[in-house]
Amino acid sequence: MATSAEKRTHFLNKIRRAKGSDRAEMSFIDHLEALRWHIIRALLVWLVAAIAIFVRIDWIFDNIIYAPANNNFITYGFLCRLSHWLHIGDSLCMPAVNIPLQGNTISGPFMSALSISMIGGIVIAFPYLIWELWRFIKPALSPKELKYSRGSIFWVSFCFFCGAAFGYYLLAPFTFNFLANFTLGTVGAYKYMPTLDDYIDSLNNIILGCGIAFELPILAYVLAKIGFISASFLKKYRKYAFVIILILAAIITPSPDWTSQVIVAIPLLLLYEISIVLVKRVDKKAEQNEKEWS
């Protein structure tokens, strides 16, 4: 019986970079060397994207980072027009937002600029980072697995950008609007002046959190392909999944506002249902393959 070390060596030997039918098996050190170069290339692309953002940091902060906290942000006008179009008055019109940011450290603006550049670099370079990961694991896949994984980079990136856009254009305005208009006490003892790094951290968490959460269908598809889950399994534990999604929505949203949490929970619930449909298709395909082999 093969030990775990032998299994690992067998798996790593499947990962080859040489082409042709007479490819020689790579040693464990060769695999580490290949992985090192994948990581180096990914870091270089991420660094270039971060530097490009840092060079234009003032414009990016004014027009992208701080935009959800401005009264003229596109989401506020869109929701208000939608409310009037639906003939429900000003139900969707959010009150004016005024979030003056302050800093309490000398290095605050510079460190915030670095944070914006690094997180923004990850968002911009995300497709390339996934591509480098794909290049590393691709030689270990069989022709059948390669066939099923066509377009995976596109769909992974697409889901991530959809989640990031959802967090930026919808969740962030609701969150900042709620927090900016929430008051404590009636005598004016508390003055609301959040710090710069607190605002940026909140925005980063919303964007990255939603981007990762929207990968749910991709994760379900992969787990179904390796036989870890099935459509019946997802249906059976649907009610428990809904509870987990609600908890996840509460974690993603930095505000205790139930409206923001519902805004996050609804698309995640829809993504869970989409995952069931995708996994069901995988199950049907597996059943057809079993019939052909039997």
Image: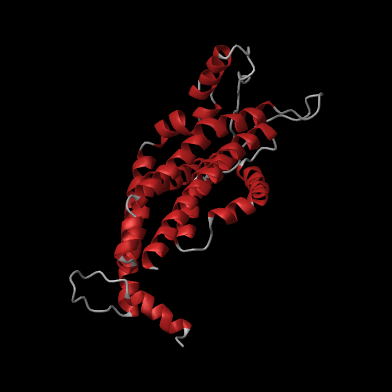
* Residue at position x 63%, y 43% in the image: 249
Color theme of the render: secondary structure
Question: As displayed, is residue 136 above or below residue 107?
Answer: below
Question: As displayed, is residue 100 above or below residue 120?
Answer: above
Residue 105 located left or right of residue 186: left
Q: Position of residue 175 (x, y in %)?
A: 61, 33
* Residue at position x 35%, y 79% in the image: 28
Q: Position of residue 216 (x, y in %)?
A: 51, 49
Considering every residue shown, the one lying at the far bottom of the view is 1
* Residue at position x 18%, y 77% in the image: 22
Q: Quadrant of residue 252?
A: top right
Q: Position of residue 36 (x, y in %)?
A: 34, 67
Residue nearer the viewer, 222 or 136: 222
Quadrant including the C terminus: bottom left
Q: Is residue 71 visible in the rendered structure shown here?
A: no
Residue nearer the viewer, 285 or 145: 285
Residue nearer the viewer, 54 or 156: 156
Q: Is residue 199 visible in the rendered structure shown here?
A: yes
Q: Position of residue 123 (x, y in %)?
A: 42, 45
Mark count: 0
* Residue at position x 81%, y 28% in the image: 185
